[in-house]
Image (spheres, helix red, strand yellow):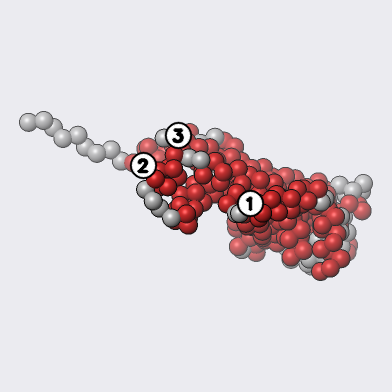
Amino acid sequence: MTAVRPTTSSTPTMGRRLRRLPWTLVAALLFLGILAIAVIAPQALATHDPFALDYPASLQAPSAAHWFGTDESGRDLYSRVIWGARESVLIGLGAAAVGLAGAILLGSLAALGPRPVRATVDRFVEILFAFPALLLALLLVAIAGPSALTQIFAVGLGTAPGYARMVRGQILTAKDSGYVRAAVALGHSRSRIVRSHILPNALRPLVAIFALSVGQSIVWASSLSFLGLGVAPPASEWGALLDAGRSYIVQAGWLVVIPGLVIVALALTATTIGRHVQAGLERGEKS
């Protein structure tokens, strides 16, 4: 009688998988977890009231009492960065969603529409490419005024043309694939082929692109706020913090350096996670 081998627990396997994760991905996930807490419950991380004025403590350097220092009004910069995470992240997510939604619409029309529609959409995308994003932001600000919503649409429309070209290429590749030719040979309708075969396979890479777009959108939105085209003071959105601190960059450089480093860290986090998601999707396609 042969002995039955005991089944091994999946815990060691899971532990080995976690240990094999790149340190960059682990750091990105840790930062993402802290950021999620700051977005959902900033009071759990903040040490001061972000809007409390304390003029005697103005422009203090980072210390044990104020980890990131204080601004010109004595407000704790660390707490303002924590409370500004929600607005900054929501602007980045909203702009990425607007950009990808526009890209899916334009890319689908450019690849699947009738010939006149394809030509019109191609010319429209070329016009958007030639239209500077900053000029578009100025136009939107002149119409609607500086606000978070203005930033979302300005950044989203500025990123849509590049992603639209990508979507168009993915759809054209899917149209020429073997599974689509097989579906045509089986007599499936055009709408069913588009809905069940072309779009799911063409749009799957956008999962990774969305993560990459969030980081890019936050950087762009912060740039608009730095130019005074974003949310108005006393908002603690990270770009607004940069705008408020640039007047004191000589005597209080931390007002610009620290929010800038947080923006860079978030952009690197989104890029790292997006690239690992993209690599996972590519491995799934090859397997």
| Relative height, residue 138 to residue 251 (above, below) | below
The tag earlier along the polypeptide, 3 or 2, is 2
Residue 99's disc is none
Residue that numbered label 2 is attached to: 11
Work out how far the residue at label 3 is from the one at label 1, CA to CA, in angstroms: 34 Å
Observer-nearest residue: 71 or 256?
A: 256
Secondary structure beneath dot 3 equals: helix
| Relative height, residue 139 to residue 13 (above, below) | below
Q: Position of residue 184 (x, y in %)?
A: 42, 47
**Horizontal arrangement in the rendering, residue 250 relative to residue 279 (left or right):** right
Of badges 3 and 1, nearer the viewer stands 1
Q: Position of residue 209 (x, y in %)?
A: 61, 46
Observer-nearest residue: 101 or 194?
A: 194
**Horizontal arrangement in the rendering, residue 184 relative to residue 153 (left or right):** left
Q: Position of residue 251 (x, y in %)?
A: 92, 48
Residue reaching furthest to the left: 1
Amino acid type indicated by mark 3: Lys
The tag earlier along the polypeptide, 2 or 1, is 2
Residue 115's disc is 1
